[in-house]
Amino acid sequence: MLRCFLIFATLLAGLAARPTWGQSVPATPAKPPLPTPAPTAPAKVAPAPSAAPKAPAAAAITAPDTARTTARTDTVNVLTPAQIAEQAYQKGLASVQTKDFAAALASFSEAIAAKPDYAPPYGTRAATHFELKEYDLALADYDQALQLVPADYTSYLGRAQTHEAKGQLTEAEKDYSEALKGGSGFGPAWYRRGRLRFDRGEYQAARDDFEGAIRADRKSAAAYHERASAQQQLGNFNEAILDYTSALALQPSLLSALLNRAAAERRAGQLPQALKDYDAYLKAKPTDALAFNNRGRARFEAQDYAGAAADFTQALTLEASYAPAWNNRAAAHLKLETYEKAEADATQAIALDAKYAEAYLNRGQAREMLRKPDEACQDWQQAAQLGIAAGTSYATLAGCAPAPPADPSPATSTAQATGKP
């Protein structure tokens, strides 16, 4: 998530070049006095012959005494409300930089009290409230800032983030759209709106927004990563691989891009590349149960059933309640013809998730091989009721008796539907 400091950064960048209210023009420095010539010894002259007495020489003109002080007139410097507001505002910005948010709030409030129609302190006080998770106070300040300056796109962006933090996603999306009217400097709004749309399953619209984020900042690894995820959801696996690769080039430490690229490579049928990426990821994060499960899927598809079973076992060692790994290991045991283990693993998956359709299908196959036809039929029919068409096919081929009427309640599994790998 983007933190509100991007708001502070935007504000500070815009304020750096602004003149400060009440700034005085520096006085011109006084010129230094001319240096006094060094005295020289009087020249010796021959005495003049006696003559009539001359008039006394005129008195020499002397320079004024530079050490003498001049009188000063003391004046009272009274700050205007605008100057008070500006000084308090700048003080608040300095406190934000040092993360002294209590002092920042006090300074911004002082600025607002001095000049209530001065908009910037409302926006920065709102951003400070956001940082402190005081979301209602933040919204009130953003509303006031936008009342004073309706085209304050930074406040739209900040208010959108605040709405999102409160779970008010419709309002957040609307404000992100308003922020985008501010131009290319509001790339984060593309990214955040794209995330909202991705989470709603609107993958095409999300991809378009992430493209906007990339146009605004071609060095954003996060934007490439999210566009790749949208591409993968749209079935564009090769495009997803390219975007994950771009994200990794910009940020090699972005391990989620490595893991997700492996998944895209597996789905694109590029199993050697997928296994290589899974290996690299697990070297960096050896305690990730999901990654072991997914590498097991890739090994299963590469027909390395023993290696797949080993990965599923490692996933279960790390997270024993992970139902997909139980089901997937059951599928590996079916391929290895260890049917008792397959039945036991599928049963455990069902115990964790009673509506796990693929686990019923796999257990039915194990029970058929263990010469348990009635139980196999029950499992296949249950799989069919839960939406697996293969359950009906297996039951028909085995000559199972018609299944009882289906439960009218929705049948959805809470487990990841990795199914029969």
Image: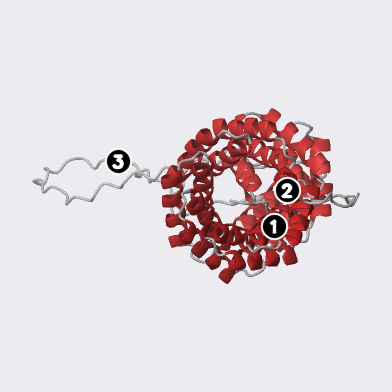
Q: Position of residue 47 (x, y in %)?
A: 11, 47
Q: Is residue 350 above or below residue 5?
A: below
Observer-nearest of 400 and 245? 400
Mark closer to the chain start, 2 or 3: 3
Q: For the residue marked with disc 3, what is the amino acid?
A: Ala
Residue 275 in view of the camera: yes
Cα–Cα gap, marks 3 and 1: 142 Å
The reply to whether the C-beta atoms of the residues labelled 3 and 1 are less than 8 Å apart is: no
Horizontal placement of 351 versus 411: left or right? left
The residue at 65%/33% (across/down) is: 209
Disc tally is 3
Kind of residue indicated by mark 1? Gly
Q: Quadrant of residue 109?
A: bottom right
Q: Which residue is mark 2?
A: 391
Q: Residues within 10 Å of mark 1 (few under 14, many from 20)?
A: many
User: Mark 2 or mark 1, which has the lower sequence index?
Assistant: 1
Earlier sequence position, callout 3 versus callout 1: 3
Image quadrant of residue 134?
A: bottom right
Element under disc 2: helix
Residue at the spot of label 3: 55
Up-down relation of residue 82 to residue 317 (above or below):
above
Which residue type does callout 2 highlight? Gly
Indicate the secondary structure of the residue bearing disc 3: loop
When asked about the image quadrant of residue 363, the answer is bottom right
Label placed on residue 364: 1
Residue 99 position within the rendered picture, expressed as x and y whole percent measured from the top left: 63, 60
